[in-house]
Amino acid sequence: MIATETLVMSLEAVAAVRLNESMRLHTSFRIGGPADIYVVAESVRQLREAVQIARRHEAPVFILGKGSNLLVDDAGIRGVVIENRSGRRGYAVQGTEVRVSSGVSLSSLARRTALAGLEGLEWAIGVPGTVGGAVVCSAGAYGGSMADVVRQVEVLSDASAVRSLEAASVGFGYRQSVFKKEGPTGSVILTADLALRRGKAEVLKARLARYASHRRSHQPKEPSAGSIFKNPQGYAAGWLIEQVGLKGRRIGDAQISPVHANFIVNLGHATAADVMSLIVMARDKVREQFSIGLEREIEIVGPDTGSKV
Ligand SMILES: Cc1cc2nc3c(=O)[nH]c(=O)nc-3n(C[C@H](O)[C@H](O)[C@H](O)COP(=O)(O)OP(=O)(O)OC[C@H]3O[C@@H](n4cnc5c(N)ncnc54)[C@H](O)[C@@H]3O)c2cc1C
């Protein structure tokens, strides 16, 4: 526990703080040990100030969106976890340009913009993350991705200065961005500017319904973190895992989903260790039988993640 009284008091002056908060409550996997200091930032200002305070105290910081791409270690996270709920102001529209706080739910933004006749985010319906997390992870689905719509992001740099970054500097790739490479000691995304297009609300609404229904019928309903592995060139990771006979394999309460083999689900009380064992097993078997190295899509967050350089 690195919490010092002055750090906690300084954080409490800008946002709500909880100590030893279980990360199970804040990850889509429903897995993870305690965060030493858990801060809830309800606005971009609170997010910025909380990060600046933690950095001033040289405490490790981890920015949490909706925790939907994470496997948090059973030992939890040392230092300060800042949950980004900035988004009270929702988003501002000017023509087809949208400026949005990074803590806004991507899926709800997709629904709201589509219903307002703005095209470009329909693919994101059902992606359970924040706009900030989606930029970092370069989220995408159904042929669309953040790279298609992000024009600019405003970030708090590692030197704690607010600056704007053009999309070209974000380095969007397949579930990759410069922010992902920087890790927790890098930039914090504050807002994003998106360029959408004019569309017909009824057409966009039908597209939303189609994608949502496809997700319902092709993805498991139990808690998960989405796809565990990236799809290697020419293959679907789920197909490879199925071919090596691991679909449905269970360790403790973690299971390679019988619905979609690239998802691991939590059947109730799965631990991060259970999930890790399945990840290693799937990776080993696929390497053995196909000579293909599966690369993880989900991020593993351990006790020392926040301080890793
Ligand atoms: C059922 C299910 C379906 C999914 N389907 C898809 C899909 O179709 N396509 C897809 O791409 N993904 C999918 N995902 C994965 C996940 O939803 C996305 O990767 C999402 O973009 C993660 O956002 P988040 O807010 O949950 O980020 P988190 O998981 O909270 O964080 C992810 C990373 O981003 C960092 N981060 C978050 N916010 C900020 C910020 N403001 N500034 C700096 N760093 C930040 C975190 O520190 C962490 O490193 C799915 C997940 C689930 C559970």
Image: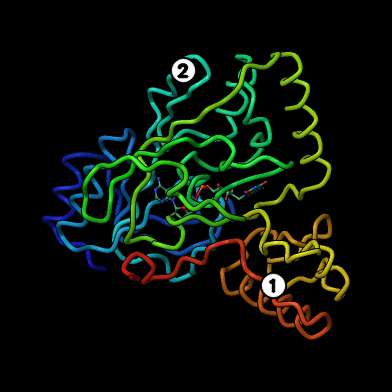
Residue that lies at the very extreme toward the bottom in this rendered image: 288
Kind of residue indicated by mark 2: Val
The crowd level at tag 1 (other Cα within 10 Å; few <14, some 14-19, many 20+) is many
Horizontal side, residue 90 vs residue 110: left or right: left
Q: Within 10 Å of the Cα at label 2, are there few (<14), some (14-19), or many (20+) other Cα atoms?
A: some
Point 72% across, 82% down: residue: 284
Please state the horizontal and vertical placement of residue 246, each as a whole percent of the image. Answer: 82, 72
Residue 75 falls in which quadrant of the image? bottom left
To which quarter of the image does residue 142 belong? top right
Tell me: is circle 2 under 8 Å from ligand 1.
Answer: no
Real-space Cα separation, disc 1 to disc 2, in angstroms: 40 Å
Q: Which residue is mark 2?
A: 93
Q: Is residue 53 left or right of residue 142?
A: left
State the image coordinates of residue 114 (x, y, percent, origin top left): 64, 21
Is residue 55 found left or right of 301 in the rendered image?
Answer: left
Residue at (16% x, 40% y) in the render = 13
Q: Which mark is residue 294?
A: 1
- Image side of residue 309 versus residue 269, left or right: left
Q: Residue at x 43, y 29 (%)?
A: 100
- Tell me: is circle 1 under 8 Å from ligand 1: no
Which of the image's four quarters has the C terminus?
A: bottom left
Kind of residue sitting beneath label 1 = Leu
Q: How is the image coloured?
A: rainbow
Seen at 74% across and 61% down, the residue is 262
